[in-house]
Image: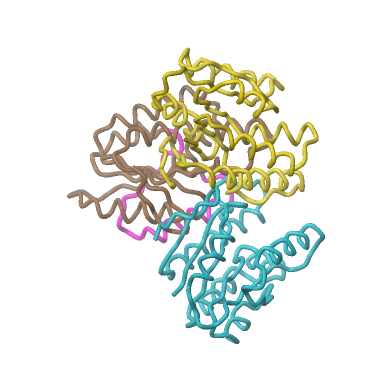
Chain colours: A cyan, B yellow, C brown
Amino acid sequence: MKTLFIGGIKSGKSYSAEQYTLALGSDQKPHYLATTELLDDEMNERISLHRRQRGGEFITLEAPLELYGTLKTTESPVLIECTTMWINNMLYHGRTNEQIVEHIEKVLALPNDLVFVHNDVGSGIIPDNPLARQYVDISGAVSQLIASRCDEVYHCIAGIATKIK
Amino acid sequence: MKTLFIGGIKSGKSYSAEQYTLALGSDQKPHYLATTELLDDEMNERISLHRRQRGGEFITLEAPLELYGTLKTTESPVLIECTTMWINNMLYHGRTNEQIVEHIEKVLALPNDLVFVHNDVGSGIIPDNPLARQYVDISGAVSQLIASRCDEVYHCIAGIATKIK
Amino acid sequence: MKTLFIGGIKSGKSYSAEQYTLALGSDQKPHYLATTELLDDEMNERISLHRRQRGGEFITLEAPLELYGTLKTTESPVLIECTTMWINNMLYHGRTNEQIVEHIEKVLALPNDLVFVHNDVGSGIIPDNPLARQYVDISGAVSQLIASRCDEVYHCIAGIATKIK
């Protein structure tokens, strides 16, 4: 079972994905794979907020880059939050679009129940600078790839998750 | 009855919300609560355009900050346009996120039929500057809060309002 | 038959619109009307990518400005990609909002099966600069006009086209 929650900033995608993962009813405690690098104070604050919100219902893993290597160590359901930040990290560390797509392909081939959280960054004005444009492009391309392999896809806005696949 | 219309710029959310409010079929003439401050010429022009479009079907109220105080003076249905601009005004006048959330909680507890218009600002690329990011965050958080208390929520794009709750 | 596919950057709207146009099952080979001007290398690369993707299933027309004049030369179904870029070209060449709307009105009155692709640029943060704001406004207004005349409208995200009209 693979599922994608996609939506803008503060659209409720994380909360919806967490509730969804907990409701999967696995025998094993679900994992929460955080992709965020601890880069600055604001980010740190956001992360601790997320952590507090999750309470003890998940086992937290951290993988800013190595999604696949981390995911294959467990058979539990895993909530991956979020693939957009992971793409950001991959680009920041010099990975190419091809490497990003290849890596996600390997992740999608894993047998685990996976719940992806992805930030929609493409529905605003097209950014001026080429790097931001490249980011929007690869982010959208990866969202398409993930969605095409998922059994269910939810679009989130204002805290409401609407099933679109 | 509480209802939310959310969508991007020029997504048709205002027009849809106006038609919806008029169709509520109240005995009393509905009110239109404009949250916009008259800050510059472009804004003035937008506002007069909105006013012309509304014709005489609404009684117009203005409340750039004091939503609650203004709303409790009437029992009529009120179209609130828009909560995103109101958040903008509140931040501009030094109010905290906590004060914004508290104020909206009081508004949501009013017995009036309320129709909220909210601008989705979170589905583009994450803004560079921290203030814009803070704005996107609180705007999204308030949209979630409002949606959670609404009986109906509509997502607008290209003039089409799709019921998502 | 008129149809609109609207969505953000890399939302899958082009691919969905292409498949849809091919499935219209016309006796005549469909046309692909490219609105893009060849302005710079990045744009050139995107265009050739699009061309490679389309293979030989479409007859390609190019019309950065003169949509109507080009469309009336054929009775085939035409996929117009995209009206957002066309608006950009029109503004760049000094056309007014009124001229843009008038032109689209003439296009919508044509008897051909038309499939429009439109980029949602309005669901991010409101741009700082007035020109970008004007662009977002006219783009949204045109999307509303097109959608109001279309028999079917699809909202695209993560490669999934959801029928909203």
Tell me the residue at 59%/37% (across/down): B109
Q: Does the magenta stretch include residue C143?
A: no
Q: Is residue C61 magenta?
A: yes
The residue closer to the viewer here, B2 or A95, is B2
Give the camera-side residue of C63 and A31.
Answer: A31
* Quadrant of the image occupied by residue A41: bottom right
The residue at 59%/74% (across/down) is A99
| B128, B108: nearer the viewer | B108
- The magenta segment: C38-65
- Percent coordinates x, y for residue C105 in the rendering: 36, 27
Q: In this view, does A135 lie to the left or right of C71?
A: right
Image height check: is A140 above or below C112?
below
Residue A125 in view (yes/no): no
Residue B104 sits in which quadrant?
A: top right
Q: Position of residue B69 (x, y in %)?
A: 67, 25
Q: Where is residue B138 in the image (x, y as percent from the top left)?
A: 68, 45
Q: Quadrant of residue A81?
A: bottom right
